[in-house]
Amino acid sequence: MAAVYALSLDEAPLSEGWGTRYRSRYQEQAETWAENWIAGFEQTLKGGLDVALTQQVAAAECMILRAKILENSSTSSPEAKMEALLKFMHDELRIFMLRELIICADILFHIQKTSLSRKLNSVLDKKDPLLFINNCAWDLYMLRFIESMINPQRFKGADFCLDRLITFDEDLADIMRLTELRAIAVHLGSHRAYPFFNSELTGWLVGLIGHKRMAAFSEKLQKEAFNHRADHRSVENVQRILAQDRLRLMELKAQKPGRSSKI
């Protein structure tokens, strides 16, 4: 954070000499700024921001939990499980989460394009599967958080483009590659952000669940369905589903062969 802040202090073009200039001219001032910013952010968290963030992460956690429950409690085909997950999103969660859906498809079809889905394959064998799934949900939410920063709602006249993200987190990098964005449109009136993924949604879903199942679900992708979900979703509903599915997953863990029913 200090280094990023220091970019605004340096008028020279960004080059290989940036690191030397930072350490010799700006490091002390920039680190003081970063420490003050972090202290302020911690106060904001205590003031309730952490609750708001946790509520948003809960929806992503619900998606992963339901995908793992479907995977471990049903002998249906991956296509049928994916159809059930789509219905869950529309009828129960009332939030259409494409990035989470793509990751859950990776789980249900055992495509294993991401290290995250590979780790989730054995989640019931972990000592604390709920904590692990919650951490995965935060990984997914991190990208939503980054994308929300392009929304100019609070910055009049702001106009910038961030076309590269650098991370050393393998899980996050895999998710970014699998759910790569082509663009984000921001409606200036409502400040709602609409992501456009490189994968075309309808064709991608047809390839997974087939034309017959897609025909039955297609109306859920129309404007009226999106508005219906927005009008009927609530934090309380998400928290209720989260509590129920956490309990159900732990029941599946207890029922797993080779484990005592007391576990």
Image (cartoon, grey):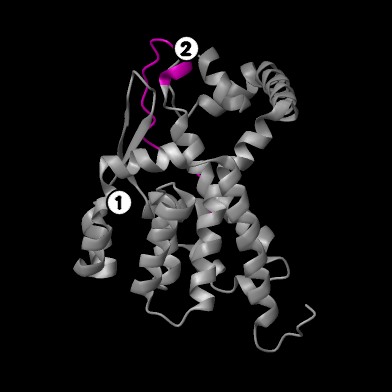
Where is residue 149 drawn, in percent x and y? 47, 28
Where is residue 242 drawn, in percent x and y? 61, 55
Magenta span: predominant SS is loop
From the image, tell me which residue sits under label 2: 11
Q: Quadrant of residue 30?
A: top right
Look at the image and give the residue range highlighted in magenta: 152-169
**Can residue 178 be spotted in the picture?**
yes
Q: Which mark is residue 126?
A: none
Q: Looking at numbered disc 1 in the image, what kind of residue is underneath it?
A: Lys
Q: Earlier in the sequence, mark 2 or mark 1?
A: 2
**Looking at the image, which residue is at 61% across and 59% down?**
133
Mark in front: 2 vs 1: 1
Q: Is residue 138 magenta?
A: no
User: For the residue labelled by badge 1, is the local secondary structure a helix, a strand or a loop?
Assistant: helix
Real-space CA distance between mark 2 and mark 1, rounded to the nearest whole angstrom: 51 Å
Q: Left or right: 95 with respect to 209?
A: right
From the image, tell me which residue sits under label 1: 220
Q: Looking at numbered disc 2 in the image, what kind of residue is underneath it?
A: Glu
Where is residue 241 drawn, in percent x and y? 58, 55
**Looking at the image, which residue is at 48% across and 35% down?**
146
Number of residues whose C-alpha sits closer than 10 Å to that of mark 1, classed few (under 14), some (14–19) or many (20 or more): many
**Can residue 170 be spotted in the picture?**
no
